[in-house]
Image (tube, helix red, strand yellow):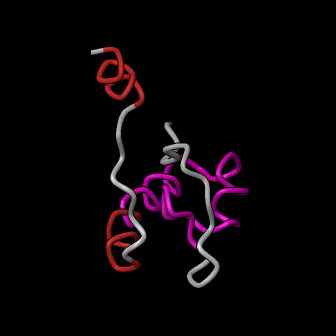
Amino acid sequence: MQTPCIHVCSIDPETGLCMGCGRTLPEIGGWMSFSDEERRQLIAILPARLAASRLAIPPQPMMQATAEQRA
């Protein structure tokens, strides 16, 4: 299963959430030990968590960014 990480790893000191994916440090650290179901449940709540925190950084796929830079 994929990780929700978008490689914008910075923890907001007020919320304790990663500004890229919305996970907490314990969630990030425990990701590999979570079951697939635990991961699915967490992934399902992350968009709402980020929206509520107003931390969301719009994701930009790396491939698209690279192609746009070359154009």
Residue 67 on the magenta span: no
Q: Position of residue 33 (x, y in %)?
A: 70, 50
The answer to which of 45 and 22 lies nearer the viewer is 22
The answer to which of 10 and 23 lies nearer the viewer is 10
Q: Which residues are magenta?
A: 17-45
For the view shown, which residue lies furthest in the top direction? 70
Q: Is residue 69 above or below residue 40?
A: above
What residue do we see at 49% from left, 56% from top?
20
Q: Is residue 54 left or right of residue 1?
A: left
For the view shown, which residue lies furthest in the bottom direction? 14
Q: Is residue 15 above or below residue 30?
A: below
Residue 32 on the magenta span: yes
Q: Position of residue 5 (x, y in %)?
A: 53, 46
What residue do we see at 68% from left, 45% from top?
32
Q: Is residue 36 above or below residue 15?
A: above
Q: Position of residue 4 (x, y in %)?
A: 48, 48
Image-quadrant location for residue 24: bottom right
**For the stretch drawn in magenta, what is the main secondary structure?**
helix
How many numbered marks, from 0 up?
A: 0
What residue do we see at 64% from left, 79% from top?
13
Q: Quadrant of the C terminus?
A: top left
Q: Is residue 39 left or right of residue 50?
A: right
What residue do we see at 51% from left, 63% from top?
19
Q: Is residue 21 left or right of residue 33?
A: left
Q: Position of residue 6 (x, y in %)?
A: 49, 44
